[in-house]
Image (cartoon, rainbow, N blue to C red):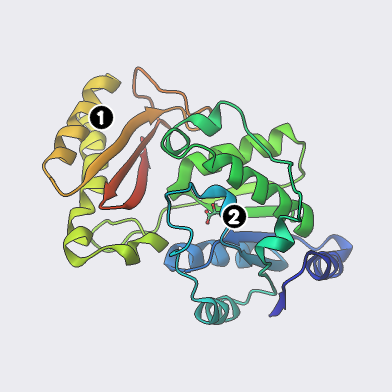
Amino acid sequence: MRVCETVATMRAECASLGYGGRRLGLVPTMGALHEGHLSLLRAARAQCDVVAASIFVNPTQFGPQEDLAKYPRPFARDSELLRAEGVDLLFAPSADEMYPTGAVTHVNVEGLSERLCGRSRPGHFRGVATVVSKLFHVVQPGVAFFGQKDAAQVAVIRAMVRDLLLPVEIVACPIVRESDGLALSSRNVYLSSEQRRQALALFRSLLRVQEAYEGGERDATRLLAAGVEEFSRETGVRLDFLEMVNPESLEPLEFAQPGALVAVAGFLGSTRLIDNVVLS
Ligand code: PAF
């Protein structure tokens, strides 16, 4: 695995490895890799001739009171995991490399960036869209892989690719869960054992909505009320939002339908976790 720390070396390596019509897949990450990331790498390995991954804790997607400083950065361990998954190229730039002095250009996907997590984290999706578009420009992948756990991020990136005419296919890979249902997240390491137990309220609230839907309820207000009721049984968790939206536009739905995205976010102390299900 070749490790590149500068835009110039990564660009040159990608151009040479992707030469001759070879399909180049990119898995963008912020490191602190877990099985969810590994599932993206395995999908990329199965579908592409060349696999590139990036590790960059992107400062512009964190709010001023958020966890940028303490975000886990186990770089040596992450590199070993990437190597073991057969990754060909790792891009691990510094913040100065990605944001040259004086940088004032941002990518904002209007509307979508203010929905779901974007409402509670102003500027977050602008930071995500900006860094992902930079990664696409440097790597020029034919396909990029993202986790469905951040379904709003997937919607924002798909809209950006459409609007900026970027020739990149976006693949969303299924959520990977612990055996008790907790969605894997790099932020799960922040949880105490008590919070780890309480965090299951997120998945339970989604299951409750899904069960009510499968039982025939279609009114979104009633379905979400059932989920909120389930959530409120766990007093250690604070609900940020529980919403039912169109998975592409992220606009709220009045009535449930197949394909509707039910997304939840909640706080355990200062740790914010997200999860979702798609109604079938
Ligand atoms: O999902 C993430 O880890 C990040 O938001 C991403 C896509 C790597 C951009 O920094």
* Nearest to viewer (mark 2 / mark 1): 2
**Where does the N terminus fall, quadrant-wise?**
bottom right
Which amino acid type is marked by label 1?
Answer: Tyr
**x%, y% of residue 250?**
48, 29
For residue 224, what is the image quadrant? top left
Residue 187 makes an appearance in the image: yes
> 68 above or below 103?
below
**x%, y% of residue 42?**
55, 67
> 179 above or below 162?
below
Which amino acid type is marked by label 2?
Answer: Phe
* Image position of 178 (left or right of 106): left
Badge number at residue 213: 1
Q: Earlier in the sequence, mark 2 or mark 1?
A: 2
* Image position of 233 (left or right of 174): left
The residue beneath circle 2 is: 145
Quadrant containing ligand 1: bottom right
Badge number at residue 169: none
* Image position of 188 (left or right of 259): left
- Residue at position x 54%, y 30% from top? 112
> 220 above or below 73?
above
Q: Residues within 10 Å of mark 2 (few under 14, many from 20)?
A: many
**x%, y% of residue 236?**
16, 49
Q: CA distance from mark 2 to mark 1?
A: 30 Å
Q: Identify the element where label 1 is drawn.
A: helix
